[in-house]
Amino acid sequence: MIALSGLRCKMPEIIDLRKSFEKALEKSVSILNKGGLIVFPTDTVYGLAAKFDEPESIERIYQVKGRDQTKALAVLVANLNQIKILSPRISENTTKLIKYFWPGALTLILEKREDLKAPLTIDNSIGIRIPDDRFVRELSERIGPLATTSANLSGFPNTTKVDEVLAQIGNLVDLILDGGECEGGIPSSVVDCRSEEVKILRDGAIPKEEIYRILTTEI
């Protein structure tokens, strides 16, 4: 287990999400509202999350991961209405990708609202995704958008099992939700939709050929 100087070194509570779904939701809401960090399984890999509008919690995510602060965090949302909190507009290409791939393993880079104070990015962009995961969507319904990144140390392998999370950052977070092995195992694809010319920034769970095919399809 790896400990980082200046951060907590206490084992977190672990809840089996498969046996205690509602307990996991209630505990997650409580911890996040207190500025804590949680780890949960998603449709891709295990994720590390805080409330999107808690600057100190977001700073702690960067510290836990040893992540470069020029690298943005993504935001997981429950529904299209929550996107309006984060981005002022949705283009036609964005609408196509949302229709075909959400909920799912596709992160869309959109224009960030000017009045959004959350320190999620250093420019006018914001990465947003609706995951294909019931727990994460219900959690976001209750508490709002979630600032997230993969639950691993920067430069280390992504985590798909709780024991892998524990080995890397287990003593640096407040709650771990055990959902077994993540079925996806591959991070989301990332697409920049801020201009008419859509750009694939990261190859991931969704093949780029499939993304381009949908973009050329009429809706």
Image (spheres, rainbow, N blue to C red):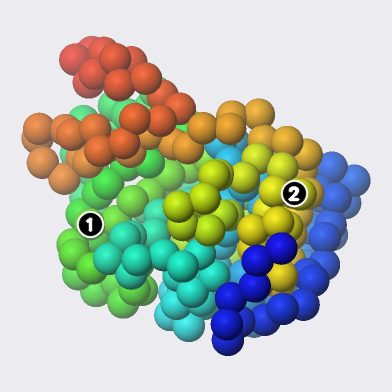
Q: In this view of the protein, which residue sits in the foreground, 180 or 79?
A: 180
Q: Residue at x 33, y 15 (%)?
A: 210
Q: Amino acid at mark 1?
A: Ser
Position of residue 170 measured from the top left corner of the image (x, y, whole percent): 71, 63
Q: Residue at x 22, y 57 (%)?
A: 125
Q: Is residue 47 left or right of residue 28?
A: left
Q: Residue at x 52, y 50 (%)?
A: 156
194, above or below 115, in the image: above
Q: Is residue 194 left or right of residue 5?
A: left
Residue positioned most to the bottom: 6
Q: Residue at x 33, y 60 (%)?
A: 72
Q: Is residue 164 left or right of residue 48?
A: right
Which quadrant would the C terminus be assigned to in this image? Answer: top left
Residue positioned most to the left: 196
Find the distance from the CA under tag 2 to the CA under tag 1.
31 Å
Where, by quadrant of the figure, is residue 157 drawn? top right
77, above or below 5, in the image: above
Which quadrant would the N terminus be assigned to in this image? Answer: bottom right
Position of residue 21 measured from the top left corner of the image (x, y, whole percent): 82, 50
Q: Which residue is mark 2?
A: 162
In contact (CB < 8 Å): disc 2 and disc 1? no
Position of residue 56 measured from the top left corner of the image (x, y, whole percent): 48, 83
Q: Earlier in the sequence, mark 2 or mark 1?
A: 1
210, above or below 153, in the image: above
Q: In this view of the protein, which residue sits in the foreground, 99 or 31?
A: 31
Q: Which residue is mark 1?
A: 125
Mark 1 residue element: strand
Asked whether the viewer can see residue 41, the reply is yes
Q: Amino acid at mark 2?
A: Val
Q: In this view of the protein, which residue sits in the foreground, 45 or 43?
A: 45
